[in-house]
Image (spheres, grey):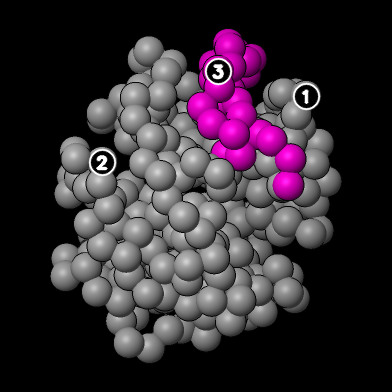
């Protein structure tokens, strides 16, 4: 299978062959591509752009451009609910207010509507089975969003700039990086309260889950490492993995048991064996 990794500073997406870990295509998607939501069942990947105010659609069959959705505002993050045939995109708020969650029809590739979810929203993860989404917010913490009602249900205040989010629906746990707290908050999604704060590296940015192997991977931008959380025990492995300078995004491909980390400091991609770590 293919893995899609945004080369943020280069304005392109690298398509990596997961079997050989070689780049097989480079797709020019915009000025500043960020998060990518992949919908395997739809044969599409959706690329948020931090600068251009667009979501670029990549055809995963041929890795060509399948369309561009113009939202008119910088886009920070996306996630897909394949069952509902909807894409959810968040405003990018780098120092300025960003408040909207945009709802997009993935068949017609058009925005249906948008609604306000916070004040400086950052990242989103969809719990499709629950029809919920979780949105991090630098100012307000974490929002639980009812996707059917298009409304915020609950907000969990959280200090230290809540940023990366990943949800384990089966365990009822949400993982949230706290950028200035050098920690990952573990949230009980039923009670919507913080169960634990796990110490990780310097300036944790993104978190991604490898559910079959019971692990979470956290990029620490400040010290060039990736922390590994054992999700069964709720503990952080004592030794972090050294990657490249200023790691930002992390994408887990569960099928091949690998995590792909984009290092903004030198534009490289580090590949981690999720079984061995």
Counting from the top left corner in percent of width and height, residue 89 is at 58, 31
Whether tag 2 and tag 3 are in contact, CB under 8 A, the answer is: no
| Badge nearest the viewer, 2 or 3 | 2
- CA gap, disc 3 to disc 1? 15 Å
Residue where numbered disc 2 is placed: 192
Q: Residue shown at 74%/40% (left/top)?
A: 96
Residue 184 visible, this angle: yes
From what the image shows, is residue 198 above or below residue 102?
A: below
Would residue 182 be counted in the magenta stretch? no
Mark toward the start of the polypeptide (3 vs 1):
1
Q: Is residue 96 left or right of residue 217?
A: right
Q: Residue shown at 30%/76% (left/top)?
A: 236
Counting from the top left corner in percent of width and height, residue 132 is at 33, 29
| Badge nearest the viewer, 3 or 1 | 3
Q: Looking at the image, which residue sits at the far bottom? A: 239
Whether tag 2 and tag 1 are in contact, CB under 8 A, the answer is: no
Q: Nearer the viewer, residue 56 or 19?
A: 56
| Badge nearest the viewer, 2 or 1 | 2
Residue 75 visible, this angle: no
Q: Which SS class for mark 3? A: strand
- CA gap, disc 2 to disc 1? 33 Å
Mark toward the start of the polypeptide (2 vs 1):
1
- CA gap, disc 2 to disc 3? 22 Å
Would residue 111 be counted in the magenta stretch? yes
Crowdedness of circle 2 by 10 Å Cα count: few (<14), some, many (20+)?
Answer: some
Residue where numbered disc 1 is placed: 72
Counting from the top left corner in percent of width and height, residue 25 is at 70, 55
Q: Which SS class for mark 1? A: loop
Q: Nearer the viewer, residue 57 or 231?
A: 231
Q: Magenta residues? A: 95-121
């Amino acid at each position: 299978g293919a893995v899609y990794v945004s080369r943020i500073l280069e304005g392109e997406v690298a398509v990596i062959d997961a079997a050989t870990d070689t780049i097989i295509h480079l797709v020019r998607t915009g000025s500043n591509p960020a998060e990518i939501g992949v919908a395997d069942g739809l044969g599409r990947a959706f690329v948020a752009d931090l600068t251009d105010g667009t979501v670029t659609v990549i055809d995963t069959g041929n890795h060509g451009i399948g369309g561009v959705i113009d939202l008119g505002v910088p886009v920070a993050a996306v996630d897909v609910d394949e069952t509902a045939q909807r894409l959810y995109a968040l405003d990018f708020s780098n120092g300025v207010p960003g408040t909207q969650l945009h709802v997009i029809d993935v068949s017609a590739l058009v925005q249906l509507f948008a609604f306000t979810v916070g004040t400086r929203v950052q990242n989103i993860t969809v719990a499709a089975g629950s029809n919920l989404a979780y949105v991090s917010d630098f100012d307000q913490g974490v929002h639980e969003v009812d996707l059917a009602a298009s409304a915020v249900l609950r907000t969990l205040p959280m200090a230290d700039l809540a940023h990366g989010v990943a949800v384990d629906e089966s365990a009822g746990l949400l993982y949230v990086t706290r950028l200035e707290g050098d920690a990952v908050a573990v949230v009980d999604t039923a009670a919507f309260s913080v169960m634990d704060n796990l110490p990780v590296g310097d300036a944790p940015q993104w978190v991604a889950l490898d559910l079959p192997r019971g692990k979470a991977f956290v990029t620490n931008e400040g010290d060039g490492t990736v922390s590994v959380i054992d999700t069964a025990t709720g503990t952080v492995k004592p030794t972090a993995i050294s990657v490249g300078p200023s790691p930002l995004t992390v994408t887990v491909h569960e099928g091949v048991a690998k995590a792909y980390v984009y290092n903004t400091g030198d534009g490289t991609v580090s590949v981690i064996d999720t079984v061995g770590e």
